[in-house]
């Protein structure tokens, strides 16, 4: 095994700190993964006519087969479960600078110096995945997402080099053989993620790193108003049970104790970002790319227009536009852990 030097979670290298401040990097070309030595994901899927929508244009790529191992009967067989949502890479990429910053704030605290295998679990359209190859130029980087739309976008935009992409679900992922596992704004969608974190901690090799970030704003007006409207008499028949109410994420202390109990060294913290968003309905535009997706999947175009009109009016009251834009507070939980012993 290649020797690696380490530092404690919570400390920053000058290189990592610089990336966290800039929040961007030069894209590294990538390709679809067919390497059988990568961690098993439990499914084999094919994406046809990969469509990448960028800057208002469309392009169609060739059929790409993604082989990521054999199904594991103990972990499920489909990267998109029956209740999973359909994602829109173009909508998700709006407010890109604001969405990028937590990723770099997270990765900047990972102390791995010379990892060989790095995984971005929940990679979305792959833009941030490529920056991991810049941070660790000696590593092979794998981006995994359960959304065919997101993986199609990633493959269409990043087709060659050390960054690879595969379709797969968090529940099927094994952390065995991974030196750095990063998961940015994914685990809130996975009800069993506490159990997964315990399993990944056990599977990591000594010296491996686990870093994840989840939103912690489910009690904020943007989410509360969405739930209240979905449960109103007009919408409850169409949207009942679509939005979760049972604590999608844990408190930082719970994650801290969980991973400490698994034998890892852990740093956990929260940051509230004060995003200044432009436009007439910026908070509505933001949630269209994330939290509102389960609602949009259930409604027709006409129903969506009616729901968004009422929801948008409530959001404008909760987040009034000021002279410089709309302030959108966003609380996030960060956890970075290292498995000792290397």
Image (tube, grey):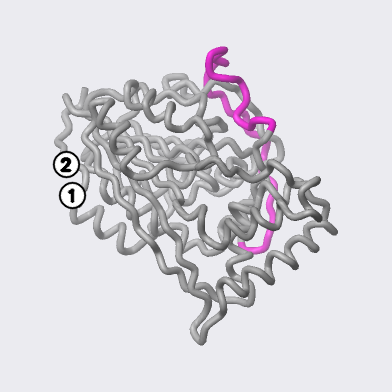
Going 27% across and 34% down the picture, which residue do you hit?
115
The residue at 48%/73% (across/down) is: 327
Asked if disc 1 and disc 2 are in contact, CB closer than 8 Å, the reply is: yes
Q: Examine the rendering and report whether any part of residue 116 can be seen.
A: no
User: Which quarter of the rendered picture does the C terminus lie within?
Assistant: top left
Tell me if 62 is positioned left or right of 261 in this view. right
Residue that badge 1 annotates: 11
Q: CA distance from mark 1 to mark 2?
A: 6 Å
Where is mark 2, residue-wise? 8
Query: Residue 50 shows which numbered tag?
Result: none
Magenta span includes 168: no
Q: Residue at x 42, y 68 (%)?
A: 274
Q: Identify whether 170 is placed above or below 90.
A: above
Measuring 25% from the left and 31% from the top, which residue is drawn there?
260
Where residue 38 sits, quadrant-wise, is: top left
Residue 270 in percent (x, y) is at 34, 53
Q: Is residue 23 visible?
A: yes
Q: Which element type, helix, strand or loop, lies under badge 2?
A: loop
Magenta part of the chain: 55-82
* Residue 173, above or below 275: above
């Amino acid at each position: 095994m290649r020797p690696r030097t380490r530092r404690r979670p919570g400390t920053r290298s000058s290189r990592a700190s610089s990336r966290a401040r800039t929040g961007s990097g030069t894209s590294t070309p990538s390709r679809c993964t067919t390497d059988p030595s990568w961690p098993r994901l439990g499914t084999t899927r094919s994406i046809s006519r990969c469509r990448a929508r960028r800057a208002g244009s469309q392009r169609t790529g060739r059929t790409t087969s993604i082989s990521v191992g054999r199904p594991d009967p103990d972990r499920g067989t489909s990267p998109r479960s029956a209740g999973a949502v359909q994602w829109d890479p173009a909508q998700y990429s709006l407010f890109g600078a604001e969405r990028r910053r937590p990723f770099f704030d997270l990765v900047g605290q990972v102390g791995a110096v010379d990892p060989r295998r790095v995984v971005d679990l929940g990679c979305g359209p792959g833009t941030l995945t490529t920056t991991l190859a810049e941070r660790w130029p000696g590593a092979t980087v794998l981006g995994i997402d359960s959304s065919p739309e997101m993986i199609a976008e990633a493959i269409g935009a990043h087709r060659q080099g050390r960054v690879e992409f595969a379709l797969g679900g968090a529940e099927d992922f094994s952390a065995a053989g991974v030196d750095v596992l990063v998961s940015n704004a994914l685990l809130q969608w996975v009800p069993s993620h506490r159990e997964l974190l315990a399993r990944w901690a056990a599977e990591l090799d000594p010296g491996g790193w686990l870093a994840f970030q989840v939103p912690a704003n489910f009690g904020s007006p943007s989410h509360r108003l969405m739930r209240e409207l979905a449960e109103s008499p007009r919408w409850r028949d169409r949207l009942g049970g679509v939005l979760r109410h049972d604590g999608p994420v844990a408190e930082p202390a719970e994650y801290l104790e969980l991973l400490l109990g698994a034998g890892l060294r852990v740093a956990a913290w929260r940051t509230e970002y004060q995003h200044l968003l432009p436009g007439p309905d910026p908070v509505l535009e933001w949630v269209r790319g994330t939290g509102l997706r389960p609602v949009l999947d259930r409604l027709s175009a006409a129903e969506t227009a009616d729901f968004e009109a009422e929801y948008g009016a409530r959001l404008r009251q909760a987040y009034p536009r000021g002279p410089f834009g709309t302030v959108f507070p966003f609380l996030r939980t960060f956890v970075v852990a290292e498995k000792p012993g290397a």
